[in-house]
Image (cartoon, rainbow, N blue to C red):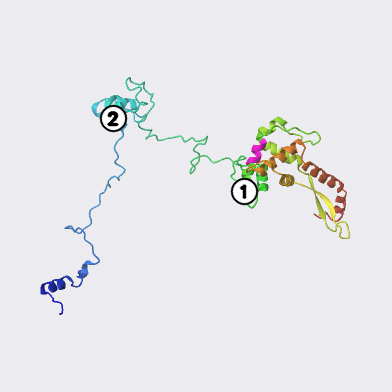
Amino acid sequence: MPPRILPRVATRALQNHQGPAIRVRAPGLWSTRRRNITQNERPLPKSDKPGPGPNQQQLPQVSEEAATMGKITGEQGPELEKGTPVQEILRRDSDAKDKAPEVLKPGTDSASPKGSRAYSTTARRHQEEAMILVAGHSLEGEGHKFGLPTLPLPAGSHLKHREDPVVEQVTQLLMKDGKKSVAQRNMARILNTLRTTRPPTFNPDKPLLANAPPASHLPLNPIVYLTLAIDSVAPLLRIKSYRGLAGGGAALQIPVPLAVRQRRRMAMNWILDVANKKVFKGSGKGGFAQKVAEELVAIVEGRSSVWDRRGSLHKLAVGARSNLSKLNMRGGRR
């Protein structure tokens, strides 16, 4: 038999499954919003004197309020230019005195002498002329808050040239693959090793510079220690070969003088070559810097092989001095 359909249940199902209701709005209300409509559509009148802003009506401070009350009651109020000592406020308010910190309670029982105050509730707010003095500079010129620095700038004031020139040059020579921070750490380790080692013992057979400080003073200034070691073994000349100057295509060796930075660069390259061949006997990081520092100490004490390299180069340059006349005969070619 087919299922029976109850008429009440079918009617209720039809009522519940009607299509979704669609709300239709009036066409004039889509683009307009509700607003309060006054009786007069004219704009509101503007005031001649605009009112104060939100931060312009602040409550008076404690000193200003006490000064106003003093004028009303005829009593002597606090001086606004000097500020009110906290002790005077605590004397008038017993509750605030009980809850005040212990550092403010001394002096609240007796009147403090005039002009002496340890704490103030306000600063000098109405001071018209203020002298601005910071680090010895005064207010000079229009548009400058502080005085302009005097030129030329003193040594060490330039950002890129604030280091000693010898330290900066050696750091550049220590750098590999553009890692300057690693070179700076090695340079710091070298200077620290020179500072903490014992004073060197000079060798009279390997004389240092004429103005060298005593051996006991060198560890006190590691930069002077470093400069003395490099300048003492820095060569004065270098040998340059001129091809075809001797005739028949043979090269001729000519001694050429060096500038200060060239001399130091050649000496530091010799020191680095010797340090790279050494074996580090310690452990941990900083082995290369330790070897360079030991080689610098050996130079000052006259035990380094860099002295022999410098001596052989100078001996070769002295023997090649006679070739300078041939160079002049060929028109001074450089």
Asked if the residue under mark 2 is in contact with the one under mark 1, i.e. CB atoms within 8 Å, the reply is no
Residue 27 location, quadrant: bottom left
Between 181 and 39, the one lying in front of the other is: 181
Residue furthest to the front in view is 1
Residue 125 location, quadrant: top left
Between 300 and 72, the one lying in front of the other is: 300
- SS for callout 2: helix
Q: Residue at x 26, y 29 (%)?
A: 69
Where does label 1 land, which residue? 180
Residue type beneath disc 1: Lys
The magenta stretch spans residue 18: no
Give the magenta-colored segment's residue range. Answer: 188-194
Residue type beneath disc 2: Ala
The Cα atoms of the two marked residues, 1 and 2, are separated by 64 Å
Where does label 2 land, which residue? 66
Whether residue 243 is visible: yes
The magenta stretch spans residue 193: yes
- SS for callout 1: helix
- Relative image position of residue 278 (x, y in whole percent): 72, 44
Label total for image = 2
Between 307 and 83, the one lying in front of the other is: 307
Q: Is residue 19 left or right of residue 256?
A: left
Q: Is residue 197 placed above or below 3 in the rendered structure?
A: above
* Sequence-earlier tag: 1 or 2: 2
- Relative image position of residue 151 (x, y in whole percent): 60, 41
Where is the C terminus found, in terms of image quarters? bottom right
Checking the image for residue 208, the label placed there is: none
Mark 1 or 2: the one toward you: 1
Q: Is residue 253 placed above or below 72 in the rendered structure?
A: below
Q: Residue at x 65, y 50 (%)?
A: 176
Look at the magenta stretch and give its main secondary structure.
Answer: helix
Residue furthest to the top in view is 110
